[in-house]
């Protein structure tokens, strides 16, 4: 059987166009890799071979008829399990939606499949996207392909791990406070959060409606740019999607950074060093600044003084929106229903208590409290004021710079259970990414090397202005090319080595 797992999205499409292999063989290659590795990684909650092979058959038939294959023809993709796709269960990693089957398609997923991609399966995630580790799935955690004793990050940990392990070429995640960029950094993959409104949210189960954004994972900036080409654009089914014209983002890759203005954010908050990697992660930004200067960019320092309030503001606004969005899961309108209730109130209470996990219940309670009479102005109102200040800081910064740089995360992937008893330490993992969601800007995490003491990936976050994804990806691709990071985790190397020795 062909092993196509090392090919980029464009190489898969071009290989099919040239008749070197078929889309069916691309799907078979993906499932062979999953069979070999997913018993250890647990990136997938559900495989969808019927859908994948049907899509492959359409691609192969079109090519046999002489049609030019679409941009993502035959590319295997994973889909985070909070996105609807007819013919699949959409559980959001929760028991309460364990029996829910999609009755419509998520727009971003449909657009990806219309571009020729093959839906290989639905990826594991923290329950309702609440978490930074993918330890909070009701169906068991996902493990990091770089070290199976460590988390892949979250909440899109399954999507990130599926790409890092070569099970799929691309995957979709959702990013509410860093849930694409953080697992991207922890698994050595590229994770893109587009500008709020750039990609339709129709069909993704909402966590924080003013914060959520769908975005792609890949092993290269070029791959995520191709995916964004496919999924970006206005959608009549989502009033928050933007009519801003869509560019051809993949065309920006390779243009270089000559003349771009790159700002180094110098006042992001620090966190305790738990794994000996803190200094190395801090130096990621300094080394990146030197790289951009050598490539011809203008580099300077910038401050975001209100960003230090981002974490506190997010953990008021995010849970507040989540408590409202999750009210519908009550055992009657949606969700698993408790057995033998004594009355309606008992039905509501036990369905939610039995269906939701501890982190979800914690956030519902936080959000309900923040929105309650007497506390709304003291908490939610103050958090929204802090959000406005953060937006103003970013606007001021982008008057002088095209791209801003920070670390993606304050530390590398941590071990399972290491932060489970301390929610605040868990929340700190998103301290550099959350301000971007509050402001609504676009940002991408690019691999920046390995920590010398742990061998785990570190990430560089590049932040762009509203709808400036082309500039963002242009800068990210230039950095990626200069760093030459080899994104192949030991688990994959051992598999390839074993095959080579046979």
Image (cartoon, rainbow, N blue to C red):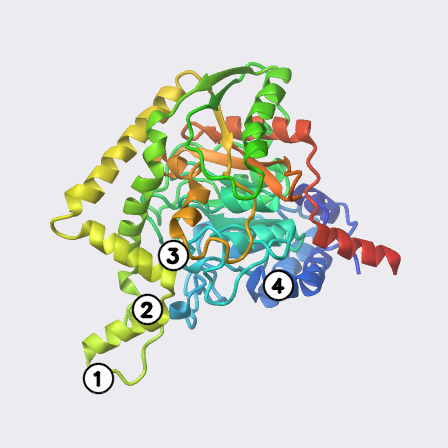
Q: CA distance from mark 2 to mark 4?
A: 30 Å
Q: Position of residue 183 (x, y in %)?
A: 53, 47
Q: Which residue is mark 3?
A: 205
- Frontmost of labels 4 and 1 is 1
Q: Residue 150 appears in which quarter of the rendering?
A: bottom right
Q: Residues within 10 Å of mark 1 (few under 14, many from 20)?
A: few
Q: Is residue 17 left or right of residue 58?
A: right
Q: Which residue is mark 1?
A: 342
Q: Which residue is mark 4?
A: 54
Secondary structure under tag 4 reads: helix
Q: Which residue is mark 2?
A: 334
Q: Residues within 10 Å of mark 4 (few under 14, many from 20)?
A: some
Q: Position of residue 191 (x, y in %)?
A: 54, 42
Q: Is residue 471 above or below residue 165?
A: above
Quadrant of the image containing the C terminus = bottom right
- Pointers 2 and 3 in contact (C-beta within 8 Å): no
- Pointers 1 and 3 in contact (C-beta within 8 Å): no
- Pointers 4 and 1 in contact (C-beta within 8 Å): no
Secondary structure under tag 2 reads: loop
Q: CA distance from mark 1 to mark 3?
A: 30 Å
Secondary structure under tag 1 reads: loop
- Pointers 1 and 2 in contact (C-beta within 8 Å): no
Residue depicted at x 46% and y 47%: 179
Q: Is residue 12 above or below residue 463?
A: below
- Of marks 4 and 1, which one's residue comes earlier in the chain? 4
- Frontmost of labels 1 and 3 is 1
Q: Is residue 242 left or right of residue 266?
A: left
Q: CA distance from mark 1 to mark 2?
A: 19 Å
Report the residue that reaches farthest toward the left.
374
- 203 and 354: which is toward the camera: 354
């Amino acid at each position: 059987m062909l092993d196509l797992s090392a090919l980029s999205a464009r190489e898969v499409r071009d290989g099919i166009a040239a008749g070197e292999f078929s889309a069916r063989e691309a799907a078979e290659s993906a499932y062979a890799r999953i069979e070999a590795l997913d018993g250890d990684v647990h990136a997938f909650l559900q495989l969808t071979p019927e859908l994948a092979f049907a899509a492959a058959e359409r691609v192969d038939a079109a090519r046999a008829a002489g049609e030019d294959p679409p941009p993502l023809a035959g590319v295997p993709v994973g889909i985070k399990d909070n996105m609807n796709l007819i013919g699949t269960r959409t559980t959001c990693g929760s028991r309460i939606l364990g029996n829910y089957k999609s009755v419509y398609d998520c727009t971003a997923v449909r657009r990806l499949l219309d571009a020729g991609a093959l839906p290989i399966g639905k990826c594991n995630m923290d329950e309702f996207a609440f978490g930074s580790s993918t330890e909070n799935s009701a169906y068991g955690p996902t493990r990091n392909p770089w070290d199976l004793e460590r988390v892949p990050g979250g909440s899109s940990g399954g999507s990130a791990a599926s790409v890092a392990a070569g099970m799929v070429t691309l995957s979709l995640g959702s990013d509410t406070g860093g849930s694409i960029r953080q697992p991207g950094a922890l698994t050595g993959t590229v994770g893109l959060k587009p500008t709020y409104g750039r990609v339709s949210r129709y069909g993704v189960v909402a966590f924080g409606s003013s914060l959520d954004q769908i975005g792609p994972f890949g092993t290269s900036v070029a791959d995520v740019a191709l995916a964004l080409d496919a999924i970006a654009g206005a959608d009549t089914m989502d009033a928050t999607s933007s009519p801003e014209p869509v560019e051809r983002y993949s065309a920006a890759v390779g243009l270089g950074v000559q003349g771009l203005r790159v700002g180094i954010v110098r006042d992001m908050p620090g966190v305790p060093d738990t794994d000996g990697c803190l200094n190395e992660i801090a130096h990621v930004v300094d080394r990146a600044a030197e790289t951009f200067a050598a490539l011809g960019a203008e580099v300077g320092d910038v401050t975001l003084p209100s960003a230090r309030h981002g974490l506190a503001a997010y953990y008021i606004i995010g849970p507040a929106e989540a408590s409202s969005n999750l009210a519908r899961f009550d055992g009657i309108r949606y969700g698993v229903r408790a057995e033998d209730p004594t009355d309606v109130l008992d039905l509501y209470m036990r369905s939610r208590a039995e269906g939701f996990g501890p982190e979800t219940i914690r956030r519902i309670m936080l959000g309900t409290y923040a929105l309650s009479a007497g506390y709304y102005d003291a908490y939610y109102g103050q958090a929204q004021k802090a959000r406005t200040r953060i937006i103003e800081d970013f606007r001021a910064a982008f008057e002088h710079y095209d791209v801003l740089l920070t670390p993606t995360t304050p530390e590398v992937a941590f071990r399972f259970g290491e932060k489970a008893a301390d929610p605040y330490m868990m929340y700190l993992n998103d301290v550099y990414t959350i301000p971007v969601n509050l402001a609504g800007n676009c940002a991408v995490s690019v691999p920046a090397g390995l920590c010398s003491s742990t061998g785990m990936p570190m990430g560089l976050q590049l932040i762009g202005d509203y709808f400036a994804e082309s500039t963002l990806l242009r800068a990210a691709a230039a950095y990626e090319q200069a760093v030459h990071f080899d994104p192949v985790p030991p688990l994959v190397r051992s598999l390839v080595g074993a095959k080579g020795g046979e």
